[in-house]
Amino acid sequence: MKHELIVFDLDDTLLNKEHKLSSKTVSALKSLKEKGKKITIATGRMFVSALPYAEELEIDLPVISYNGAYVCDPKSHKVIFHHAISTDLVQAIIKEAEQEGLHINLYYGDDFYVKERNKGVEIYEEIAGVKGRTIGKLSENYKGEATKILLIEKDQEKKYHYLDYFKENYGHKLEITESKEYFIEFTAKDVSKGEALEKLAKSLNIPQKKVIAVGNGFNDLTMIEWADLGIAVDNAPQPVKEKANLIAGHHDENGVADILGEIFDI
C-alpha cells in the first residue's frame, strides 16, 4: 500500500459512543505502526483532551487539535503551531452570543472558560476530561485572544439559524463549522484540519498522494478532501460521505479498524 501517513478524527470516528478506543481499534492502529506507517490525530478537541488517546495509541507525531488551530508534540508538549482568534473578534462573538442567551465555551491553549457551572458544563467536562474555569460573564471578564470559541445549542432549528447567521456575518473573518450536531465552532481565518494536515505532511516530506484522512464531521471535510484517500465513517452526515473516497462502518461498530484491515491487510 502506497500510503504512508494516516490521520484520524477522534469523536464519532475512532471513539465509540462511550468516548473510548475499542481494543480492536487500538490493535489496528498499532499494527499500522508496525508496518512502518505514520499515524496521528486531528480533532476539534483541546490538545490536553486529545492527549490521553494519543498516549494510548503511542503516537509520536504532532497532534492536530482545535480543528487545526493548535498543533503540539505529544511527547514534549511543545507547541508547534498556534493561530488564535484576535481579541476584537472574540469580544464580538461573545457579545452576540450572550445577547441571544447561547452557551459559550471559550478556549485558549490548555484551558477553557465558562460563565458558570451547570449540568451541561459538567457533562462536557466528563467527556473532555478537562475542568473548565468559571469566570462569570465572559464579555466582562475575558479580554484576550481565543484558540477556539464553541457555542452549544441543542435545539436544531435554532442551531442552524445561528450557524447561518454567524457564517453570513463573520464568515469572511473567521472559520465557522460544526462538529457534533449541537456545536458551532469558531477558529481563526484559514485554520482547518486540512491546512494543518498539509503542513504536517510537508514537514514530514510525505506527498499528498501518500496521505489518508478519516473523519465524520463537517469539520473533517477539509482534510477528507485534501488527502489522497478520504474516508468517512457510516455515521457521518450525507454531505460528508459524498466528499469521501471510501465509507467505513459505523464508529460504534469498529468501522475504522475494519476498513484499515481491508486496505492494509492487518
Image: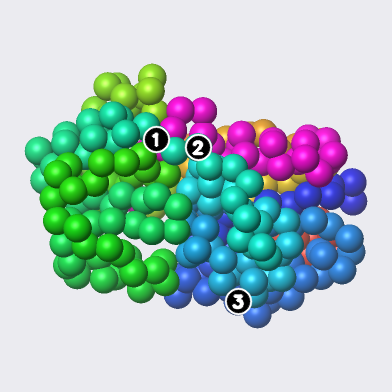
Where does label 3 land, which residue?
Answer: 22
Q: Give the range drawn in magenta.
A: 181-208
**Can residue 207 be found in the magenta stretch?**
yes
Mark 2 nearby-residue class (10 Å; few <14, some 14–19, many ≥20): some
Q: Contact (CB < 8 A) between labels 1 and 3?
A: no
Q: Is residue 258 visible?
A: no
Which residue sits at x=79%, y=60%? 262
The tally of labels here is: 3
Residue neighbourhood size for the residue with mark 1, other residues' Cα within 10 Å, grouped as few (<14), some (14–19), many (≥20):
many
Tell me the residue at 56%/71% (across/down). 52
Pointer 2: what residue?
83
Q: Kindly report the distance in space between the C-alpha atoms of the residues bearing marks 2 and 1.
A: 7 Å
Indicate which disc, 2 or 3, sits on the residue closer to the N terminus. 3
Sequence order check, earlier mark of 1 and 3: 3
**Residue 71's spot in the image, x, y percent?**
59, 48
x, y percent for residue 243: 59, 35
Looking at the image, which is closer to me, 258 or 41?
41
Q: To which residue does mark 1 refer? A: 85
Q: Where residue 156 is drawn, which disc sits there?
A: none
Question: Depth-wise, is mark 1 or mark 3 nearer the camera?
Answer: 1
Please give left or right for residue 260 compared with residue 147 in the image: right
Secondary-structure class at tag 1: loop
Looking at the figure, which quarter contains the C terminus? bottom right
